[in-house]
């Protein structure tokens, strides 16, 4: 009996050893790639094809990013031209690992195209101060040739990738030539760097706006080049009239165009910058809202009634399109794609109710879309029933009239029709709509073009939002979307004079 027990235990031990040995399945490292020859900046996809069902992978990529990986099928980017080795180590449980290394396996070539570019930490420095240039070229250049050429033709050079330059006073054009064994490229930035004598000064300034209203303010910013230590401002028509602050704020009390003068100085030199008619001040009496559309729908008037972008689908309103004035922007409405419409909405909380008041809406418009009704603005409407009241201006191209300005309520309406030259001519036009008692007037480019007198005083508009670029339909829907540009929208709670119309047209 005892011998039988010994035999059984021996058999179990052998079985255990046999099972353990079976788990030590051998593996053999193998892999493939989607491509071996690439251009710098491209990626390679590696795929494990090892034998023996490995459960662990350790990759090593010379010259690659990442340099290592434990994934089954990693993706590796190679930025620098050359030939690079790849090594894979695989294992399965307690089995002995297998290693495969392929030397100079990945070939990375120079790209066929280079793009030269650069920047500097600042474009104006004092003499003795370094200007730090940074190469931004794409395509893996291997050499850099910089030239710094003064307005007098004097030249300094550098072959560093990111040079730090101390240059004599002057205005410099900067040229960068980059190259690799395959190709080359050049970038020139004219009058890019100004090196200023520490004792020199050149007056210059800017402001947050160049237009305001009587009672409004403008914040000025000194942008003088050089080592200014004193600032003497003179503000025609402003309060204060003078200032020694570097960046003053000035209030204007009367409409008009005004000159601004800045004299900057230090212990050695001085400089004067004078800008005639730099500031335009429009009438502030009865001003409801004033929209310049300089990158947003901000109201720069006293009411702070922001015009917010609304839309359906992917429709929107952009504020990055060039206006009629150089360097300024306007609101752009692109409402040609069905279901994707954008417009502006002013939620005024009762501050902008037209009712039976006199009012004025002045704006600039530009469109080339003919044969389509499009609303430039509207207040009221969008309600079912006899209580509806509204006022609006709409283009009527393709009919017997070119534009209509309306006030109406449940007793009827007054329709002032503009029937002269077409407005959809891809030109900027200044439109002014005035309600003066029971009389409606339309001015185009500073000239009265249409007038209509009603028989009763209409309740025009209500506490619904003011819409710019569309009309309201029943139950607050939207329709007749505008396609084109709009700029400098001004609203008054009174009928302005012809002199004030000319001021809005010419500022």
Image: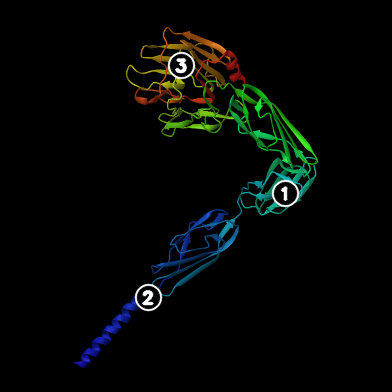
**In which image quadrant can residue 381 be found?**
top left
Q: Is residue 235 visible?
A: yes
Q: Residues within 10 Å of mark 2 (few under 14, many from 20)?
A: few
x, y percent for residue 125: 72, 45
Tell me whether circle 3 and circle 2 mark residues in contact (CB < 8 Å). no
Going by the picture, which residue comes out furthest to the top? 455
Please name whichever residue, 470 or 104, is drawn nearer the observer in this view of the structure: 470
Tell me if residue 125 comes above or below residue 494 in the rendering.
Answer: below
**Seen from this angle, which residue lies furthest left?**
1
Name the residue at 52% across, 19% down. Answer: 424
* Dot placed on the residue nearer the N-terminal end, 1 or 3: 1
Side of 447 where 56 appears, left or right? left
**Residue 441: x, y in percent?**
51, 12
| Front disc: 1 or 3 | 3
Label 3, label 2: how many angstroms apart (C-alpha)? Answer: 95 Å
Where is residue 38 drawn, in percent x and y? 55, 55
Q: Mark 2 points at which residue?
A: 24
Classify the position of the C terminus by image quarter.
Answer: top right
> Can you tell which quarter of the image residue 150 is in?
top right
Nearest to the eye among marks 2 and 1: give it: 1
- Residue 478 occupies which quadrant of the picture? top left
- Does the image show residue 367? no
Residue picked out by circle 1: 146
Instruction: Tell me which numbered mark, 3 or 2, is placed earlier along the sequence.
Output: 2
* Percent coordinates x, y for residue 452 in the rendering: 47, 9
Q: Mark 3 points at which residue?
A: 357
Q: What element carries label 3?
A: loop
Q: In which quarter of the image is the N terminus?
A: bottom left
> Which SS class for mark 1?
strand
Q: Tell me the CA gap for discs 2 and 1.
A: 63 Å
Looking at the image, residue 178 sits to the left or right of residue 397; the answer is: right
């Amino acid at each position: 009996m005892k011998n039988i027990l010994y035999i059984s235990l021996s058999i179990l031990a052998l079985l255990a050893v046999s099972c353990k040995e079976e788990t030590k399945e051998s593996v053999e490292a193998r892999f493939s790639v989607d491509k071996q020859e690439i251009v710098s900046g491209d990626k390679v996809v590696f795929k494990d094809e090892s034998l023996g069902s490995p459960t662990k992978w350790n990759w090593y990529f010379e010259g690659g990013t990442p340099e290592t990986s434990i994934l089954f099928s990693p993706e590796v980017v190679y930025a620098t031209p050359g030939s690079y080795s790849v090594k894979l180590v695989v294992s399965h449980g307690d089995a002995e690992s297998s290693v495969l290394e392929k030397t100079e396996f990945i070939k990375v070539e120079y790209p066929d195209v280079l793009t030269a570019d650069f920047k500097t930490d600042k474009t104006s420095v004092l003499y003795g101060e370094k200007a730090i240039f940074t190469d931004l070229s794409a395509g893996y250049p291997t050499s850099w040739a910089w030239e710094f050429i003064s307005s007098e033709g004097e030249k300094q050079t550098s072959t560093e990738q990111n040079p730090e330059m101390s240059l004599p006073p002057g205005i410099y054009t900067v040229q960068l030539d980059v190259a690799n064994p395959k190709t080359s490229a050049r970038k020139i930035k004219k009058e890019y760097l100004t090196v200023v004598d520490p004792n020199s000064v050149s007056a210059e300034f800017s402001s947050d706006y160049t237009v305001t209203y009587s009672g409004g303010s403008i914040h000025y910013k000194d942008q003088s080049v050089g080592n200014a230590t004193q600032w003497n401002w003179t503000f025609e028509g402003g309060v204060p009239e003078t200032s020694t602050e570097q960046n003053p704020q000035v209030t204007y009390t009367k409409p008009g165009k005004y000159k601004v003068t800045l004299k900057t100085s230090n212990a050695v030199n001085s400089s004067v910058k004078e800008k005639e008619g730099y500031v335009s001040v429009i009438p502030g009496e009865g001003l409801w809202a004033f929209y310049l559309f300089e990158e947003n729908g901000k109201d720069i008037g006293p009411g702070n009634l922001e015009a917010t972008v609304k839309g359906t689908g992917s429709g929107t309103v952009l504020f990055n399109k060039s206006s009629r004035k150089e360097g300024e922007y306007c609101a752009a409405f692109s409402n040609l794609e069905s279901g994707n419409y954008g417009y502006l909405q002013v939620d005024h909380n009762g501050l902008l109710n037209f009712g039976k008041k006199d009012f004025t809406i002045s704006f600039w418009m530009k469109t080339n879309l003919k044969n389509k009704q499009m609303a430039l603005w509207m207040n009221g409407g969008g309600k079912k029933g006899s209580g509806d009241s509204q006022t609006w201006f709409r283009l009527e191209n393709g009919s017997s009239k070119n534009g209509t300005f309306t006030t109406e309520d449940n007793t009827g309406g007054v329709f002032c029709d503009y029937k002269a030259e077409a407005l959809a001519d891809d030109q900027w036009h200044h439109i002014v709509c005035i309600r003066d008692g029971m009389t409606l007037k339309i001015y185009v480019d500073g000239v009265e073009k249409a007038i209509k007198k009603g028989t009763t005083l209409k309740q025009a508009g209500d506490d619904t939002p003011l819409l710019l670029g569309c009309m309201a339909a029943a139950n607050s829907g939207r329709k007749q979307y505008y396609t084109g540009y709009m700029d400098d929208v001004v609203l008054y709670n009174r009928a302005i004079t012809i002199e004030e119309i000319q001021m809005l047209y010419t500022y």
